[in-house]
Image (spheres, grey):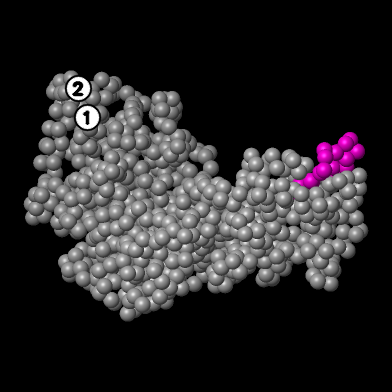
Amino acid sequence: MSESLSATTTRSEDPTLAEFLDCLESGNCREALAKADEALKQRFVDGASVVDLVCLRSTLVDNALLYLWHRHMQPLERTSALIAVGGYGRGELHPHSDVDVMVLVSEQPDENGAAALTDFVTSLWDAGLEIGHSVRTVDECVAEARADLTVATTLMESRSLAGPVALFDDMQAATGPEHLWPSDQFFEAKRKEQIARHHRYDDTAYKLEPNVKGSPGGLRDIQMIGWVAKRHFDVQTLEELVAHEFLTPGQLARLSEGRAFLWRVRYALHVLTGRREDRLLFDHQIKLANMLGYEDATYTLAVEQLMQRYYRTVMELSRLNEMLLQLFEEAILMDPAAEPEALNSRFQVKNGFLQTVSDQVFADEPSALLELFLLLQQNPEIRGVSAYTVGLIKRNLHLIDEEFRQNPRNHRLFLAILRAPAGVTHELRRMNLYGVLGLYIPAFGRIVGRMQYDLFHAYTVDEHTLFVVSNLRRFALSRFDDEFPQCSRIMQSLEKPEIAYLSGLFHDIAKGRGGDHSELGAVDAEAFCLEHGLSRYDARTVAWLVRQHLTLSTTAQKKDIGDPDVIHEFAQVVGDQRHLDYLYILTVADVRGTNPKLWNSWKASLFRDLHSLTSRALRRGLENPIDREQLITETQEEVRTILRHQGHRDSEIEKVWSLFNDDYYLRHRSEEIAWHTGWLTTADIRSDTGLLDLRRQPDGEGVAVVLYTPRSHRTFAHATAVLDELSLNIVDARITPLDNEYSLDTYVLMEQDKHMETDDLRLQKIRQALTTMLTRTDDDVLKVTRKAPRQVRMFDTATSVSFGRATVRDKTVMELVAADRPGLLSKVGRAFIACGIDIDTAKIMTIGERAEDVFYISDESGKSLDDNAREQLRTAIVERLGS
């Protein structure tokens, strides 16, 4: 539904068209199109209107097709028509859009006509056009359209280029709503089609690699409005909906501006890639931002500015799409004479939708802008907000000013929304979509549509924030108890769940300001809570949670939580069980809401273990920390019970345990120790090459591997290379020296492809690869040939090697930050071998495109590294990984 230039546009009206027509007359259609495309590309780079360019390219193609039609189709000119369909039918062509045409015939052509058709289609391909074509009679059009809604849609927006107009008119009439797909059926089917399409994109417009055309709020959503309008009202342009009072001039302007922006992005994607490309992949985003004139600012990259505008645009288009489809539903499917049912003096329900009783409700009582969402929670049978009321909200958003934000009635309404027994997440999302949430909490408004250019954060900051609140909400609802039983038990026992929701809302609210977003966000959170009447203690609890929201995650993933000193230090940070419980559920909700691909059962078990161990430390009292000897004794007794139940004799157990040192018991769970011990009771512990065993993780996905090897064989470099080549992620590695000059190395592995099943065949393949690896010597170099994923290759992370000031159990703590890549850990292992370094523990953490790994290491004598050894190791690692 755009205003295409006519195929009969004269040369004088556009210089590119004039040059194209001159070249076309020379007989070289391919050359004419190529030159015209280059001219359009340059005009785009120079800042020409994308609306003009999209329409002009359609006009150029119109003229090319007419030239070839008249040249090849003389035998059929009187009995067939050339019809543009699809996007081309709307007069909209981007540089590499498909050109869809239909040859409409009065009857199937004879041999001469078929030959002419073949010549015509061949000439289109020879001209360099990406052609989609069909040949149909009117009856065939009717049959195809009746059977397939997509065909009916393309025919509905078709236009005639050449041939008998009467033939085209007959097809239009025969496939119109009077004969098939009447507007009510068309609307219902198209709405289902949109819902299914949105599902394919996880019902969110805020993924970091969206599809400009298909994602929610994209070009398809605008086209959806046009299709329904054309079917029901027989309008040709969106402008005509203003006359039908289905669009206000302001809404039309926002639709047009949004479409023009998305067209500009799509046009640039086609120019950059040289092909039809609708995905805003990381590969293109930086180049796209530069092409469209964005520049890096102090705290915001050019690419982040581009993407924030994109997300805010599709958010507005999503709201308009919802509102207009609601209007169509009311006009097409609902009873306009239905009597409304009053809810109170401000709101009523009509045809199942909430609406204001008059245009002046928000002007007379601005608090109704919040009350509306509370009413939706209190009346779950209401289907949504009427389209007119959605528009009324938009026109009254200016009422949410500082006076509104300071009004105690509004404070009570907002807290009531958070404390409601149902609909908390749903209404917060609706508040964000309608623009209310970002105005009521201005700091939230600044993160709306804000992306972070990395692979760790899968969503924009506002979308991630609402996912976190959604995850917290699921913990509070008993019907989801099976998902995270411990989190559900804790959340449902909390006296004030709104504290968790508020910490979720504010935990990332200061992203993009510079400085520590946790500290800045804590200040915002405390001020907001105090303004809303929370007690000073509760306000400080929310602020503390925002300030510490990363602490539990980093402790669990980067420190040795088997060390009682680590647990005692963390327990001192949280202080009491209440703060620990809130922080635990917030952390799980946060990590799950950051990137669903990065959450796994290993992280779940780490967080769960840290919560359990810290709870135990808090019960004992911070002034009475558990000592190592007591913890080891308790662990041994628990393991001994398991092994006796399995039929092992105490003498067998003691023989194996005589090899283990105290650190081993602190760094492994009881069931792991039982597995290792039972395995070693029947193993040849004098094996020259070493032994291995593996199993599926008992508490979720993943594989656990244990290697028993002579200490002289440093297997870390080889093992990590083999496992990496098998597309396995190493999430944890522990190397424990034994008292017989052997070491016990344990690895926890996750499939890089979460869809891959770790079946018996897969386990056998891992076992065979590691068995072969045990025969290697330290001098052997195993190469990893697996390529890095496309997205990872787009980022450039500097290699950083740092050492902790303090030692842990006389071990040096080394942190490595580097670009994640195949073979990374193996190269680090080679550096350890070259520098004579022994590994005690490796805590492996991949954050999107960046590896952040922590190693507990010592020299060959088991001592921490001196300054000279540290510098040699840093140099060796940087040489192997690159700076």
Residue contact at pointers 1 and 2, CB within 8 angstroms: yes
The numbered dot on residue 254 is none
Q: Nearer the viewer, residue 165 or 178?
A: 178
Q: For the point 20% across and 58% down, which residue is it?
A: 496
Residue 864 in view (yes/no): no
Q: Is residue 678 above or below residue 391?
A: above
Task: Indicate the quadrant where residue 436 lies.
Answer: bottom left
Residue indicated by mark 1 = 674
Q: Is residue 162 left or right of residue 515?
A: right
- Give the residue number, with chain letter if any, for mark 2: 646
Identify residue type, mark 1: Ala
Left or right, residue 393 beside residue 498: right
Point out residue 818 in the picture as x, y percentages from the top left corner.
43, 53
Mark positioned earlier in the residue sequence (1 or 2): 2
Is residue 848 visible in this depiction of the protein? yes
Q: Residue at x 44, y 62 (%)?
A: 386
Residue 371 in which image quadrant: bottom left
Q: What is the spatial separation of the Cα atoms under label 1 and label 2, in whole angstroms? A: 10 Å
Taking the magenta stretch, the answer to whether it contains residue 101 is: yes
Does the segment drawn in magenta span residue 732?
no
In the image, the segment drawn in magenta is 98-120
206 versus 114 height, above or below: below
Three-letter amino acid code at disc 2?
A: Gln
Left/right placement of residue 690 relative to residue 791 reads: left
> In which quadrant is the N terminus drawn?
bottom right
Circle 1 SS class: helix
Tally of numbered tags: 2
* Residue at the spot 32% in from the left edge and 79% down from the top edge: 403
- Label 1 crowd (10 A; few <14 / some 14-19 / many >=20): many
Q: Position of residue 223 (x, y in %)?
A: 60, 57
- Give residue 95's position: percent from left, percent from top: 70, 57
Front residue (pair 691, 786):
786
